[in-house]
Image: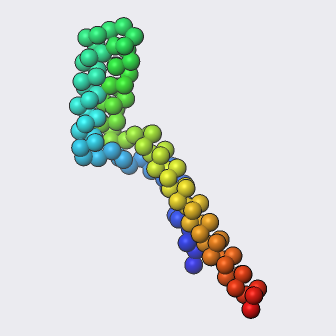
Amino acid sequence: MSDAAPPLNRLATDHAPNVHGWERAACLGSGALLIGKGLRRGGLIGALELAIGGVSLFRGITGQCPAKRYLAETRAELEQIRSELDAAGRRLAELGKTAKA
């Protein structure tokens, strides 16, 4: 039996919402607030507030965050590597025991 984690290609094609509950509500509220502030302020700072508010609003409406998905994929990949290294270490220890016997 292998201790390896499931393949990562499932994560790359998974477009299910990854922003839920209070996090999603906070994105909707802060996005709307930043868009309103950006429209009132104008200029470069207003444009920046509009952009950040738009991203936050997108995140809240769709429930998807590409940055969060990327971090989850990276974390899963690191866990898979850790699992493979642990399994290799166990096999190496077993080989060391059989070589001494």
Q: What is the x, y in percent for residue 16?
A: 38, 49
Left or right: 49 as drawn, with respect to 86: left
| Count of numbered circles in the view | 0
Tell me what residue is drawn at x 58 percent, y 74 percent: 2
Depth check, front residue: 69 or 79: 79
Whether 95 is drawn above or below 58: the answer is: below
Left or right: 59 as drawn, with respect to 3: left
Q: What is the x, y in percent for residue 8?
A: 54, 56
Q: In the displayed orientation, state which residue is furthest to the bottom.
A: 101
> In which quadrant of the rendered view does residue 100 lie?
bottom right
Quadrant (top left/top right/bottom left/bottom right) for the C terminus: bottom right
Whether 43 is drawn above or below 24: the answer is: above
Q: How is the image coloured?
A: rainbow
Depth check, front residue: 81 or 31: 81
Tell me what residue is drawn at x 25 percent, y 25 percent: 32
Left or right: 32 as drawn, with respect to 85: left
Tell me what residue is drawn at x 33 percent, y 41 percent: 63
- Is residue 33 something that shows in the picture? yes
- Is residue 13 something that shows in the picture? no
Q: In the displayed orientation, state which residue is furthest to the top.
A: 43
Tell me what residue is drawn at x 33 percent, y 38 percent: 62
Q: What is the x, y in percent for residue 60?
A: 30, 36
Whether 1 is drawn above or below 6: the answer is: below
Quadrant (top left/top right/bottom left/bottom right) for the N terminus: bottom right
Q: In the displayed orientation, state which residue is furthest to the right.
A: 99
